[in-house]
Every structure is written in structure tokens, then in C-alpha cells.
Image (cartoon, rainbow, N blue to C red):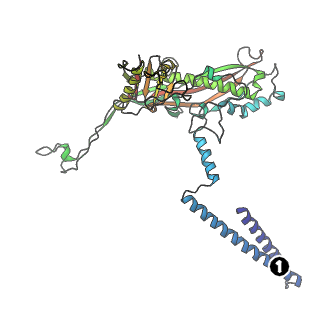
């Protein structure tokens, strides 16, 4: 509709300009219109009038359509275009990009850095005597995801090209999805760790006297003075440094020319390897050297002792009870709401194999849907970083993973004798820090 209005406006302007040109010529010569000029001006004005009427009608139609649209939006009528927009926005929120998933490897092979690297090689092939050095490609949100609101960078991708079976070598990692994500511009983070609190909230009567508390005879009481109770927190200052997690893999120069293979190598090994070590550090880092202070080594967490299997119940039933009691401790003692369970694969296997006296499995059995069933309504995080025979139940939102600076992927042959061996190194690294804000929101469960 806007195109039609513009066209009619141009037509109106043309006819008016034609009439003005003829009139200006007659005025400049100080004479009246000739018969031909008068006829031409009359015709131009008639066409201008027609264009003006059509323009007014088009504007009126546009106003009506806008009113219909506004009314439809007001009562919840959404057209197909709006639905498509909503779908795309939801896809972005879920870590996708406009209907397609974009991994770190795919982002790298479509980057200017990779294109520049290939353009330096004749026909995209690296000769054995060519030097290779790419500019680092930074990912500000390698930890928190390529999408600002999601974990898109760490999603499992539909791998193409050279498939090397990452599922056979790497475990799925989900702990980062439960912890609070943050960013920092410092190499050292200082935060307050909550070690205790006193909730003194209570109903308070209105003051019955203007006298100060403790004054007068008899002495004015807090209730008479309308004094509100004071709650308080006990905190300690904790400083945690930003750590670097990095590794590299060797590839041939021939493989470097294959974008699909480069993407798979980055996604299947480099990206997944960073994820794996990151989760290991968040759970079991001992805080020494370059390690995080992981959850298992933070003081102030709660404990839940093993529970024996009740009489008449199948073997392993006591483990389920212990996890449930830990969930209660997180709620009643830690004053938090648990949002996950971290457990070693061996212990999860034991729970999956629990069956009743008729041999019916508690958790789906061998024909159940692929995936881990929740325990007591909590998502299960299967991690080899957990100590066998132990599990963690907690509100993982009370732990923060800070992303520092840009993480990067770099390609170079400037390593050892790689240049003469026609090899290059692909390096991935990230810098991050981890901290537990409220240790009492976590409970270590002894299963056996």
C-alpha cells in the first residue's frame, strides 16, 4: 500500500509541475496562454485532480487497514507473519539462530578469520612449504553460549562432514545449564558468601506511644513503640581468581582445507573437551594451582548420611530415600529450593536398575525413553566428576560461573616441528571463574 501511495504522489507532482512549467513560461514572456497552452494546462490540472482523488482514497484505505490491524492485535489476532516472528524469537531464546543451530565450529568456518586463512592458499589448498597462522577468533560467550540468552554454544549439534563419534567418547554435560551465568572484566573476583542468616520477620503492631523505646516509667516496650524486628546475614568475603582452560589438537594442512572436517574437529573435540573440564572443575576442583574451588571442596555445605534399604523394599531403595531427605535439608536448613541432582554414572546405573518384587523397573526400564528420569522432581546431572557413592542435591542457582574476556579458536603451524611435517594446531581456550554464593544450599549425599 505504501508503494501505491508513493506512486500516486509522484504522478500528482508530475502533472502539477507540467502545469507550472507552462504558466511560468507565459509569465516570463508577459502574455496570456495560447490556445494550445491553455488546453495543455487544463489537461494537466484534470489529471492532477484525478491523481489527488486516487491518492486520498489510497490513504483512506491504508488508515482503515491500520485500524483493522490495531483492532485485531488488541483482541489477540496474530497473522502468519507474526507467528513466524514469534517462532524465530523463541528459537533464539532456546539457543538457535533463526531456525538453525549454530555451533562454535560452524561459526569458525564461516568467520572472516577462516576465510582469510583459506584465501592465502592457492585454490584453497595448503602447500607443504606454506606457513599457516590465523587471527584468533574470539567468542565473548563461549561459556554462556553464542546466543546472549542461551547455552547455544554448548548444544549438541547435527554434525556433518567427518563424523568421529563424539557420543562414544564424551558425556553429555548439563550442570552449566543450572548454575547462574555471569561475566567479569577482572582477573580476580571478590564476592560475599552467605554463611548464615536470621529471619526475624514478624507481624508488628502499630505504635501506641510517641515516646522513645526504653524511655518512661514504666519503660516503653518494643511492641508499644512499634519497633520492626531486624533480620541479618552472616557473610564472609571470598576472592577467586579467573582460570584458563585450554587444549589443542593437531590436524593436517589437507584437513584444514575441508571446512566440514574443521567444524567437526572443533565441535567434537575442542568444544566438548572444554565443556568436560569445565564441569569437572565446577564439581571437583580442589582450589590449588590453576584449579577452581569446586563444590565438593567448599566448606559449609550440608551432608546426608546413607539410608539403609527398608525391609521389604528392593536393593538400592535406601539411596532414593537419602536423596529425598537431602532435598528436604536444602529446603528447611538451606532455605533454598533444589533444582538438580549431580550423580556419578555408576550410581545412576544402580538407581536405574531398581525394580519392585515383580521385576518392574522404577525408572522406565530398558524400553523407556532415551534420557535420564528425574529423581523426586529434580533433573539429574550424570557426571564422572562426582565421587562414586556420593551425590549432590542443591539449588545450583546459588553458584555462579563467570565468563572472562573473549575465548578463542586459533590455527597455527608455529608449534614444534609442525611446519616441516605439514601439520597445524587448532587451539581453543577460555577464561572463567566459579564461586558458591551459599554453601548451605547444597547437600552432599552418601549413597552407600
Query: Residue at horizontal 69%, vertical 26%?
Result: 264
- Above or below, comparing residue 368 to residue 95 in the picture: above
Residue, disc 1: 43
The relative height of residue 209 versus residue 114 in the rendered view (above or below) is below
Q: Quadrant of the C terminus?
A: top left
For residue 159, say whether it is visible: yes
On screen, residue 63 versus residue 333, left or right, reads right
Number of dots carrying numbers: 1
User: Residue sitting at 76 percent across and 71 percent down?
Assistant: 12
Q: Is residue 129 above or below residue 333?
A: above
Measuring from the top left, give residue 32's x and y in whole percent: 85, 85
Who's the residue at 39% across and 27% down the image? 324
Quadrant in the picture for residue 194: top left
Residue 103: image location, x then y, percent: 65, 32
Q: Label 1's element? A: helix
In the image: residue 338, left or right of residue 9? left
* Residue 236 placement: quadrant: top left
Up the image or down, 422 lies above or below 232; here it is: above
**185 or 377: nearer the viewer:** 377
Query: Residue 221, position in %: x, y?
Result: 17, 43
Q: Quadrant of residue 235?
A: top left
Mark 1 crowd level (few <14, some 14–19, many ≥20, 10 Å Cα):
some
Amino acid at each position: 500500500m505504501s508503494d501505491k501511495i508513493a506512486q500516486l504522489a509522484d504522478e500528482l507532482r508530475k502533472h502539477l509541475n507540467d502545469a507550472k512549467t507552462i504558466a511560468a513560461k507565459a509569465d516570463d514572456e508577459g502574455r496570456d496562454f495560447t490556445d494550445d497552452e491553455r488546453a495543455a494546462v487544463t489537461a494537466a490540472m484534470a489529471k492532477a485532480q484525478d491523481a489527488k482523488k486516487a491518492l486520498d482514497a489510497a490513504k483512506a484505505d491504508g488508515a482503515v487497514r491500520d485500524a483493522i490491524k490495531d483492532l485485531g492485535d488488541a483482541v489477540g489476532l496474530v497473522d502468519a507473519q507474526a507467528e513466524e516472528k514469534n517462532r524465530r524469537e523463541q528459537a533464539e531464546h532456546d539457543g538457535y539462530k533463526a531456525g538453525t543451530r549454530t555451533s562454535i565450529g560452524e561459526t569458525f568456518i564461516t568467520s572472516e578469520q577462516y576465510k582469510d586463512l583459506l584465501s592465502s592458499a592457492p585454490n584453497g589448498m595448503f602447500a607443504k612449504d606454506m606457513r599457516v597462522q590465523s587471527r584468533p577468533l574470539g567468542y565473548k560467550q563461549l561459556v554462556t553460549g553464542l546466543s546472549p540468552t542461551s547455552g547455544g554454544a554448548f548444544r549438541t549439534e547435527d554434525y556433518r562432514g567427518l563424523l568421529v563419534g563424539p557420543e562414544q567418547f564424551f558425556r553429555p554435560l548439563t550442570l552449566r545449564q543450572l548454575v547462574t551465568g555471569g561475566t567479569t572484566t577482572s582477573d580476580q573476583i571478590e564476592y560475599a558468601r552467605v554463611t548464615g542468616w536470621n529471619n526475624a520477620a514478624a507481624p508488628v503492631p502499630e505504635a501506641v506511644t510517641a515516646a522513645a523505646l526504653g524511655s518512661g516509667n514504666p519503660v516503653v516496650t518494643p511492641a508499644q513503640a512499634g519497633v520492626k524486628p531486624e533480620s541479618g546475614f552472616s557473610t564472609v568475603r571470598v576472592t577467586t581468581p579467573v582460570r584458563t582452560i585450554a587444549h589443542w589438537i593437531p590436524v593436517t594442512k589437507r584437513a584444514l582445507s575441508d571446512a566440514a572436517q574443521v567444524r567437526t574437529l572443533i565441535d567434537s573435540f575442542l568444544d566438548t573437551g572444554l565443556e568436560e573440564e569445565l564441569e569437572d572443575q565446577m564439581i571437583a576442583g580442589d582450589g590449588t594451582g590453576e584449579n577452581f574451588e569446586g563444590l565438593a571442596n567448599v566448606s559449609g555445605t550440608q551432608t546426608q548420611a546413607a539410608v539403609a534399604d527398608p525391609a521389604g523394599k528392593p536393593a538400592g531403595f535406601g539411596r532414593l530415600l537419602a536423596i529425598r531427605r537431602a532435598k528436604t535439608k536444602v529446603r528447611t536448613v538451606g532455605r533454598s529450593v533444589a533444582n538438580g541432582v549431580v550423580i556419578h554414572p555408576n550410581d545412576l546405573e544402580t538407581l536405574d536398575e531398581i525394580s519392585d518384587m515383580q521385576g518392574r523397573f522404577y525408572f522406565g526400564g530398558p524400553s523407556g525413553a532415551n534420557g535420564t528420569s528425574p529423581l523426586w522432581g529434580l533433573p539429574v546431572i550424570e557426571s564422572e566428576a562426582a565421587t562414586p557413592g556420593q551425590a549432590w542435591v542443591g539449588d545450583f542457582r546459588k553458584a555462579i560461573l563467570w565468563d572472562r574476556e573473549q575465548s578463542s579458536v586459533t590455527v597455527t603451524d608455529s608449534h614444534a616441528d609442525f611446519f616441516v611435517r605439514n601439520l597445524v594446531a587448532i587451539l581453543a581456550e577460555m577464561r572463567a571463574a566459579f564461586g558458591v554464593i551459599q554453601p548451605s544450599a547444597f547437600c552432599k549425599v552418601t549413597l552407600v
